[in-house]
Image (spheres, rainbow, N blue to C red):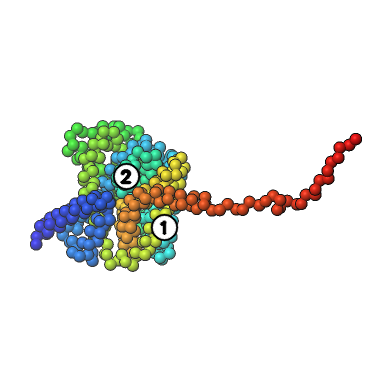
Amino acid sequence: MHHTTAMLIELGAIILALGLLGRLAGRVGFSPIPLYLLAGLAFGQGGIVPLRASEGFVATGAEIGVILLLLLLGLEYSATELVTNLKTQYPSGAVDFVLNAAPGAGLALLLGWGPVAAVALAGVTWISSSGVIAKVLGDLGRLGNRETPVVLGILVLEDLSMAVYLPILTALLAGVSLAGGAVTLLIALGTVGAVLYMALRHGRLISRAVSSDNAELLLLVVLGLTLVVAGVAQHLQVSAAVGAFLVGIALSGEVAEGAGNILTPLRDLFAAVFFVFFGLHTDPADIPPVLVPALALAAVTALTKIATGHWAARRAGITAKGRWRAGGTLVARGEFSIVIAGLAVGVEPRIGPLATAYVLILVVLGPLAARWTEPLARRVTDRVTRRVASRPAAPAVEAAAVAEPVEPMEPVHASG
């Protein structure tokens, strides 16, 4: 069969299958991401019917998917909101990093994978899935809840931290020296700082230059600008995804709203392709050996994320119910965990299967945790309270039993 014909058939089959899987996930009120990953596993290396002709196109589509995911996330924030979140939420971000990066790094060292793999696996367990969490918040009707700004603040800090983390990881994976890594990091920080400065000082001018009443022109200009900035960022050793995120932050007002509406279908298409692509490059036979570590890691880091959200919401003065809701909402991992694992498979191939199994577990558990953490915590608290209240009180000790005997008083006779 001619290569072009085979590619069109494979692409059509992939997109059709993604549509059907997405519809199935929607009917059961579930995130489609685990189904996309499973589809990639089924038709990738070692799968049922390996796809060959469309591999190059799917790889490019996956890169675009990551860029669009972060662009649309950036469009949700203004530069002012971003700076405000940084000022108020940075202690929560520090707690988030310590509690959730440590289990991944510890497991990698325990398995003997080395320090570079430890840095990579720390990132996999650290970063929550902004895409999955945003969808869950909308599905549960919690966008207006008091704890939601706390959740979004932590997500923004995580996404911004990628501007520092990814250049460091890239340098480590490439075997760059300490001096070279420092230069890479300085370039990355300089690039991020310059874009943030432009967004704060000249965001309106940028938005005005990009703005157009014609949907087609707005799509072409925003998408073209994003791809150019992402490419330049990648060349400067900053993640292309972070570059796209910063473009989204630089756009504001009606331009951001219009671009978000136009680009959302494209994001959904290419993001689905991204998850399929990761599954295509993971051999299903590699997952069973890492399933037990993945389950253990998922259990530990689900609890640490709940603790992170609870602490951050408590610090913000949120009530007990909101604290548990915030913690449960942060459990899901997704796109960034897969991106980091994809970068690290060259150094430690077992990270890919482990990350796939880990993300599959938590992307399934995440929406459930967001819905049920608060009711379960309330039920446990009520049960403990009832048990304490039902315990018989300690028998009262009679005062006479412990007091020393008192001599009887002699009668007092009236004088005279």
Give the quarter of the image for residue 215.
Answer: top left
Indicate left or right for 218 with 110 as reference. Answer: left
What residue did someone put label 1 on?
A: 300
Q: Position of residue 411 (x, y in %)?
A: 83, 43
Indicate left or right for 119 with 356 as reference. Answer: right
Q: Reply above or below: 106 against 246.
A: below
What residue did someone put label 2 on?
A: 140
Q: Distance between the residues labelled 1 and 2?
A: 25 Å
Judge whether residue 127 can be spotted in this image: no
Identify the residue at the far left of this view: 1
Residue occupying the point 31% across, 55% down: 364
Judge whether residue 80 can be spotted in this image: yes
Give the quarter of the image for residue 142.
Answer: top left
Mark 2, other Cα within 10 Å: few <14 / some 14–19 / many ≥20: few
Lower position in the chain sequence, tag 1 or tag 2: 2
Residue occupying the point 23% across, 33% down: 211
Q: Reply above or below: 282 against 380.
A: below
Residue occupying the point 33% across, 39% down: 77
Q: Position of residue 336 (x, y in %)?
A: 32, 52
Q: Reply above or below: 45 against 377.
A: below
Residue occupying the point 18% across, 55% down: 17
Q: Where is residue 394 in the image (x, y as percent from the top left)?
A: 60, 53
In this view, the residue in front, 368 or 86, is 368
In this view, the residue in front, 65 or 381, is 381
How many numbered marks are there?
2
Q: Which amino acid does label 1 sit on?
A: Val
Mark 1, other Cα within 10 Å: few <14 / some 14–19 / many ≥20: some
As helix, strand or loop, the secondary structure at mark 2 comes to loop
Q: Which amino acid does label 2 sit on?
A: Leu
Q: Position of residue 280 (x, y in %)?
A: 24, 60
